[in-house]
Image: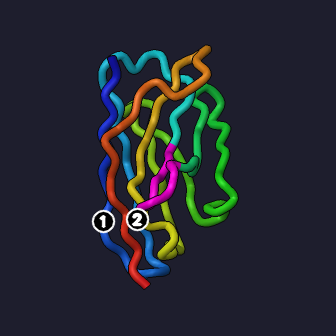
Amino acid sequence: QVQLVESGGGLVQSGGSLRLSCAASGHTFNIWRMGWFRQAPGKEREFVAHITWNNDNTVYADSVKGRFTISRDNAKNTVYLQMNSLKPEDTAVYYCALRRPFRENYDYWGQGTQVTVSS
């Protein structure tokens, strides 16, 4: 089993920055990819960014490209999401997720952390 714990959410003004962290514990030796997703009220969960563990390849949703940066600390089994130039439409619960090798979907999810951007 793997446990994911997010932190770093909060309230910030438009144009501000936040950094989210997601620490993985448990059977973390088998990480293929970790990602961030978000869900705003009344909307479906959407992809934000992911990073592939063995080559640091990153992918971003168009809506956050150039503003958000995903990174990882291998030694700490932690993935980060640096969010700059935040907009009110970035307001959502942000979830991190872990995908093991040869899996089609993400296997494990965190509990989520609220990000609220005021205008």
In this picture the colour scheme is rainbow
The span from disc 1 to disc 2 (Cα, nearest Å) is: 8 Å
Pinpoint residue 53: horizontal percent, then vertical percent.
Answer: 57, 29
Identify the residue under disc 2: 18
Local SS, label 1: strand
Q: Residue at x 36, y 33 (%)?
A: 76
Closest to the camera, between mark 1 and mark 2, is: 1
Pinpoint residue 69: horizontal percent, then vertical percent.
Answer: 56, 55
Identify the residue under disc 1: 10
Quarter of the image with the C terminus in it = bottom left
Q: Residues within 10 Å of mark 2 (few under 14, many from 20)?
A: some
Q: Residue at x 61, y 22 (%)?
A: 104
Q: Give the magenta range.
A: 36-45
Local SS, label 2: strand
Left or right placement of residue 16 versus residue 105 in this view: left
State which tag comes first along the sequence, 1 or 2. 1
* Contact? badges 1 and 2 (CB < 8 Å): yes
Pinpoint residue 16: horizontal percent, then vertical percent.
Answer: 44, 76
